[in-house]
Amino acid sequence: MEETKILHFRMLGSFSYGEERNGDTAYEGGSLKAGKKALSVLQYMIVHHARCVSSEELIEQFWAEHTSKAPGNALRNMLFKIRLLLKEMFSEQGELLLTVPGGYLWSGQVSLELDTERFEKCCMEARRQPAEESLGLLLNGISLYRGEFLSGNDSEWAVMTRQYYRTLYLDACKAVLPLLHKSERWMELIGICERAYQADFSAEEFTAYQMRALIALGQPEAALAVYGTYRTRLEQEYELL
């Protein structure tokens, strides 16, 4: 029986991909020769890899405005481009995206692993654990969030999905802060606050906990500087006087 190959995809931050070899995975992605729409369709298929995606769903998602007089032909041409793209990405693999009755499905010879799924699993499992036991799960999840979901994709489906993962990330950060504070893990706390601030600068929890950590480290001036930056950003963003 042929061994199932594992294809890895990073969807949080810049899109990248890799194939596990000798227990290690080297990621690539920056040099892909693909148009924005072709890449977006491929990424959509990756996100929904666990099920058959129908032609109607893809046409509704990517040709809803009927910019093409023959969306069915446009879809078939797009799938041809995507298969060429997959061959560029995984040259040693056979046909990866199959046409089946009712739509398109990934080959059973491969298994797709996504950082988004691992991230979501950590966040959801942490919610089911007592606070003290959730710390490891929360930190693992936060470490997987390398940036916003498919940061270079401005398609409507990606933007909506991006908000979901951003909310999961911010909730995880807010949940982990009191646990790190209780354990006096000040540097970890500061690092998480600084990263979370980039996703949502207006959440006062990140500024407040960062200030507490700096004060605990004997750096009150730095804590005041953090507050000053926070206040200035709010004033600029919301035109407060």
Image (cartoon, rainbow, N blue to C red):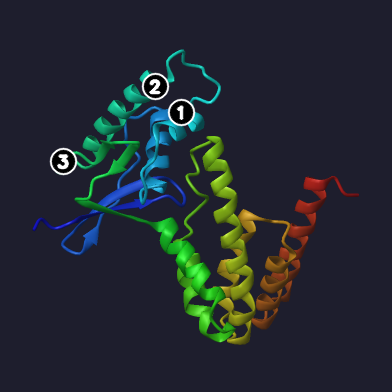
Name the residue beneath numbered marker 1: 59
Q: Is mark 3 on a helix, strand or loop?
A: loop
State the separation of the CA atoms marked 3 and 2: 25 Å
Direction from residue 40 to residue 218 in the image, left or right: right
Direction from residue 210 to residue 38 in the image, left or right: left
The quadrant in which residue 130 appears is bottom right
Give the residue type at disc 2: Gly
Name the residue beneath numbered marker 3: 94
x, y percent for residue 82: 31, 32
x, y percent for residue 48: 41, 47
**Nearer the observer, 129 or 134:** 129
**Furthest-front residue in view?**
101
The quadrant in which residue 88 appears is top left
Q: Residue at (32%, 22%) from the top-left corner? A: 77
Residue 214 drawn above or below residue 146: below
Which of disc 1 and disc 2 is earlier in sequence?
1
Q: Is mark 1 on a helix, strand or loop?
A: helix
Name the residue beneath numbered marker 2: 72
Which of disc 1 and disc 3 is earlier in sequence?
1
x, y percent for residue 188: 54, 74
State the separation of the CA atoms marked 3 and 1: 26 Å
